[in-house]
Amino acid sequence: MNKKIIIGVISALIVVMVIAVGFGFKSAGAKAKEENIQQTLTVEKMDLESNIYTNGTVTTDEARKINYDGTGVVEKVFVKEGEIVEKGQVLAKLKSDQLENNIQLKKIQIEIEKSKLDQMIKEGDQSLNIALKNAKVQLEEAKRNHEANKALWEAKAISNTEFEKSKTAFEQATNNFDEADFKLKNSSNQSNIAVQRKTIETANLELKQLEKDLGKTTIKSSIDGTVTQINLKEGVAFKREDHMFYVQNFKKNEIVANVSEADINKVKLGQKVKITGNSIKGKTLFGKVLRIAPGTKKIDGKKQAYVEIRIALDEYIPDLRTGFSVNLVLNTASKKNVKAVKFEAISSDIEGNKFVNILAKDGEMKKVPVEIGVEGDVYVEIISDEIKVGDQLLMNEDYTKVEEETF
């Protein structure tokens, strides 16, 4: 056969096929559009759960930087990194020879000052003490005489002159006693005794501070936990700005997570949380919401504000180390045997009221107001006496348009 004829036939066939295929696509598209207009979703009965999905980071609720408020040379380190310790356990000891010498010297000083005080008290103000005792005797005698004369004067047994004389003698004796007491209390010796007592009191306070400093040179753990960091070496001076040990109590591990402002009102204290992660493959752990932060925080690249929550694990899991990331599912609501349909069947009016469109057997459509209950991942609970299980609901127009545009 002529090559030109063969090529012409083939070309004609290709044109026919292209036209046929194009017509087929056009018909299929039109048919799909027609079907989409009437696409329905069935009301079903099922158990529904409403969940929040987020991720979190493992942290510990109890961690301490063990430090020493001063400088010194490390004498001995008693633990290693990774070692489990108890509260009060000795971790290290600093050299304390100088402190111990200072304590002994301070004790000797206090003994000397006490001896000085005893001597000062023993010597005292003998003449002033005698004068005070004599003034006291004279006062008591003048008082008795005056009280006796007062009784006689009231009985008109003595004259006014005699009464006034005894009264004057009593007042003079009182003044003499007060003056003697003042001189004794304000003598230079008494002042010296008071100063000496203050000297001893100050020395005792200094001794207590030295003994307190000595106690600090024995470094102890303030919590139960694991030593995760050691920043000192034996025989090397320790710098105050560094921390000596870092101790973490992994048995009090928690998970910190951020929940968006859209979901935070669904989160409650004590709420159950399901936990999975790469570090615990094949395991599903559980915990509960322990704390919800009162404030909010911003996260880079996110428009919404977020609230930090903390989750306590139901059990201690050694595999979950601090810093590990985990996946979280927070169950916010659950119901059994509810009427449910896919989200695509729910529509909203301008005021935000929810409704669905029921497709009757005769092809008629009816708009029915509904309330939304538990919202699952795919299905949502619909609350309405008019809606029955098995009813066919038209797909929301917004979803239909998306499917048409996608096609």
Image (cartoon, helix red, strand yellow):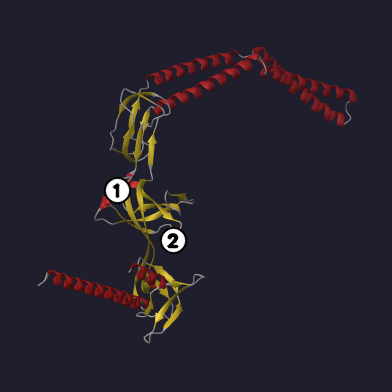
Label 1, residues with CA under 10 Å away: few <14, some 14-19, many ≥20: many
Q: Amino acid at mark 2?
A: Lys
Mark 2 → mark 1, Cα distance in angstroms: 27 Å
Question: Counting other residues with Cα less than 10 Å from the Cα at mark 2, is it few (<14), some (14-19), or many (20 or more)?
Answer: some
Q: Position of residue 389 (x, y in %)?
A: 36, 79
**Can the viewer see residue 365 in this picture?**
yes
Viewport quadrant of the C terminus: bottom left
Image location (x, y in percent) of residue 306: 44, 53
Image quadrant assignment for residue 130: top right
Which corner quadrant holds the N terminus? bottom left
Q: Position of residue 132 (x, y in %)?
A: 69, 18
Q: Quadrant of residue 190?
A: top right
Circle 2 sits in a helix, a strand or a loop, which is it?
helix
Drawn side of residue 32 relative to residue 140, left or right: left
Image: 17 above or below 175: below
* Mark 1, residue position: 320
Q: Quadrant of residue 385?
A: bottom left
Q: Compared with residue 340, is residue 209 higher up or lower down, i.e. above or below?
A: above
Q: Is residue 398 above or below residue 210?
A: below
Residue at (89%, 23%) from the top-left corner?
161
Element at label 1: loop
Write the residue at 44% across / 77% down: 384
Does 89 appear above or below 255? above
Q: Residue at x 48, y 16 (%)?
A: 109
Asked whether residue 137 appears in the rendered view, the answer is: no
Specify the label residue 266 is tagged with.
Answer: 2
Depth order, front residue of 297/16: 16
